[in-house]
């Protein structure tokens, strides 16, 4: 494709439009509620094609054994796919993450395998940046998508476009879409006169369907919006890591604009709320961390325990297994080891393990987003200060006093602890 676009300039427009149509198709698959992102429930589970390849390449097995293994793997995969589809209201499972990764490799190879900015300019002029950035916030992506490769793959394409074309529209469109995501997160970081419990846990407890709460954006909108915001933050961190003076000035100009300062204020408020959420979620996992005078925390724990009891009582074995698999997919730490204790200790361990089962994924999501925001804030401060080396006389450095002052004030106010 790259050779055709370079040696046949007449095909450049058609090829660019085809690439944009591919991105729009990904956006459609990621936003249509009839689709759900398919992913294996455990590390030992692989795709049917991998099962067939591994069965074909296995040494020392007869043809009958290979056929039996193929039938077993295919039947189990089909049964699991049918169960997942039924549990998600007949939603069609698709390998959305693999689609995004393959498309980003394809697009980045075309845009970056060229010493000029012809392909990038054509891509931007035809409106390719908008669907490209929308991929970062697709509602059908898993809530832990930012810790996987799709967000980084999109950020790599954006960095290639910025390095070759120095396109300012990338910042404008990215800030605009991130501002829209922050608008959907306002219930999470809105200031309250009296501090309450964890809003993420309350959202999880209010979910009607046990199985689809982590795979459906309408069931847990705040959690999915956090994942989308994390993706945009990863993209901005990636493109702002630059040593070129022109790109540094371009970044400062847009972050110091009215739209940039508005987004920066929202990110600072979000960071403060994430610190509070992480503190509460960590306290819920251990009774020793909750002060005796925090009545709201005790009430929330009682409500959550009642909700979890109801979920476990109404769920079938398949349902419980699917929920547990979804929980394991959201955390990288191994499950706690069960020990033989007395009846009282068993009840306590069961409650503690159940709290970890439901709370730990939320704690991991809030902590990861908080770390990404801290990295972005630190990077923006470095951009304001400038490189450590002495600047040449011919270089004009864009001054950003309002931007630096606003960032300093937001971080200073954000460091204050919320009232209890």
Image (tube, helix red, strand yellow):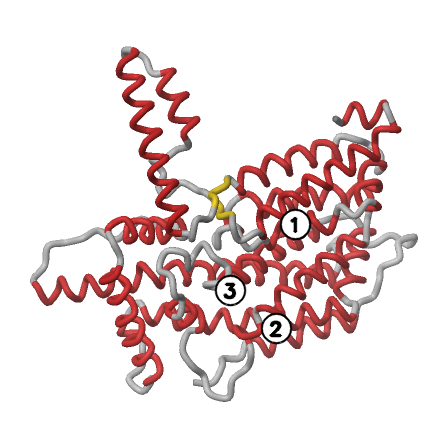
Mark 1 = which residue? 238
- Please say if 43 is above or below 260: above
Q: Position of residue 228 (x, y in %)?
A: 57, 57
Point out the image quarter for the C terminus: bottom left
> Which residue is at a point 54% across and 75% down the rendered structure image?
187
Q: Badge 1 local density, few (<14 within 10 Å), some, or many (20+)? A: some
Left or right, residue 226 beside residue 13: left
Near mark 2 (Cα within 10 A), the count class, few <14, some 14-19 or many ≥20, is some
Give the position of the N terminus as an image quadrant.
top right
Q: Image quarter for residue 184?
A: bottom right
Residue drawn at x 71%, y 46% is: 158
Disc 1/disc 3 C-alpha distance (Å)? 26 Å
The mark lying in front, picked from 3 and 2, is: 3
Q: Please give left or right for residue 12 compared with residue 324 in the image.
A: right
Return the x and y of residue 221 as percentages of the image width and height.
51, 64
Q: CA distance from mark 3 to mark 2?
A: 27 Å
Residue 392 shown left or right of residue 227 in the figure: right
Residue 11 in the image: x percent, y percent? 84, 29
The CA distance from mark 1 to mark 2 is 21 Å
What residue lies at 84% left-to-right and 42% top-to-bottom? 121
N-terminal of the two: label 3 or label 2?
A: 3
Tag of residue 221: 3
Q: Secondary structure at mark 1?
A: helix
Q: Earlier in the sequence, mark 1 or mark 3?
A: 3
Name the residue at 10% across, 59% down.
341
Query: Label 2, on which residue?
Result: 411
């Amino acid at each position: 494709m790259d050779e055709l676009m370079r040696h046949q300039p007449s095909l450049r427009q058609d090829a660019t439009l085809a690439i944009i149509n591919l991105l729009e198709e990904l956006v459609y698959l990621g936003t249509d509620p009839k689709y759900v992102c398919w992913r294996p429930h455990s590390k030992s589970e692989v795709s049917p094609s991998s099962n067939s390849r591994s069965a074909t390449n296995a040494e020392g097995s007869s043809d009958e054994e290979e056929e039996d293994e193929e039938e077993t793997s295919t039947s189990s995969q089909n049964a699991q796919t049918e169960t997942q589809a039924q549990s998600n209201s007949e939603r069609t499972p698709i390998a959305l993450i693999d689609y995004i990764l393959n498309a980003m490799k394809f697009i980045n190879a075309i845009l970056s395998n060229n010493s000029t900015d012809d392909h990038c300019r054509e891509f931007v002029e035809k409106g390719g940046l908008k669907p490209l950035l929308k991929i970062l916030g697709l509602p059908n992506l898993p809530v832990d998508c930012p810790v996987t490769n799709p967000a980084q793959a999109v950020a790599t394409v954006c960095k290639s476009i910025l390095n070759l074309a120095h396109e300012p529209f990338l910042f404008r469109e990215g800030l605009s879409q991130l501002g829209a995501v922050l608008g959907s997160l306002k219930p999470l970081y809105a200031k309250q006169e009296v501090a309450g419990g964890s809003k993420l846990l309350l959202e999880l407890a209010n979910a009607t369907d046990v199985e689809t709460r982590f795979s459906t954006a309408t069931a847990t909108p705040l959690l999915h919006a956090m994942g989308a915001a994390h993706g945009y933050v990863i993209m901005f961190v990636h493109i702002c890591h630059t040593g070129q003076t022109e790109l540094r000035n371009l970044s400062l100009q847009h972050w110091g604009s009215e739209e940039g300062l508005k987004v920066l204020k929202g990110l600072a408020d979000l960071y403060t709320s994430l610190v509070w959420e992480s503190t509460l979620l960590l306290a819920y996992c251990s009774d020793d961390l909750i002060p005796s005078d925090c009545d709201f925390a005790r009430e929330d724990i009682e409500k959550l325990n009642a909700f979890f009891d109801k979920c476990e009582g109404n769920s079938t074995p398949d349902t419980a297994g699917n929920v547990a698999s979804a929980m394991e997919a959201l955390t990288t730490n191994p499950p706690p080891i069960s020990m033989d204790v007395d009846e009282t200790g068993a009840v306590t361990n069961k409650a503690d393990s159940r709290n970890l089962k439901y709370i730990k994924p939320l704690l991991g999501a809030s902590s990861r987003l908080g770390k990404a925001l801290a990295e972005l804030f630190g990077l923006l401060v470095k951009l304001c200060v400038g490189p450590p080396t002495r600047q040449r006389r011919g270089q004009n450095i864009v001054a950003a006093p309002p931007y630096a002052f606003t960032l300093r004030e937001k971080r200073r106010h954000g460091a204050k602890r919320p009232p209890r």
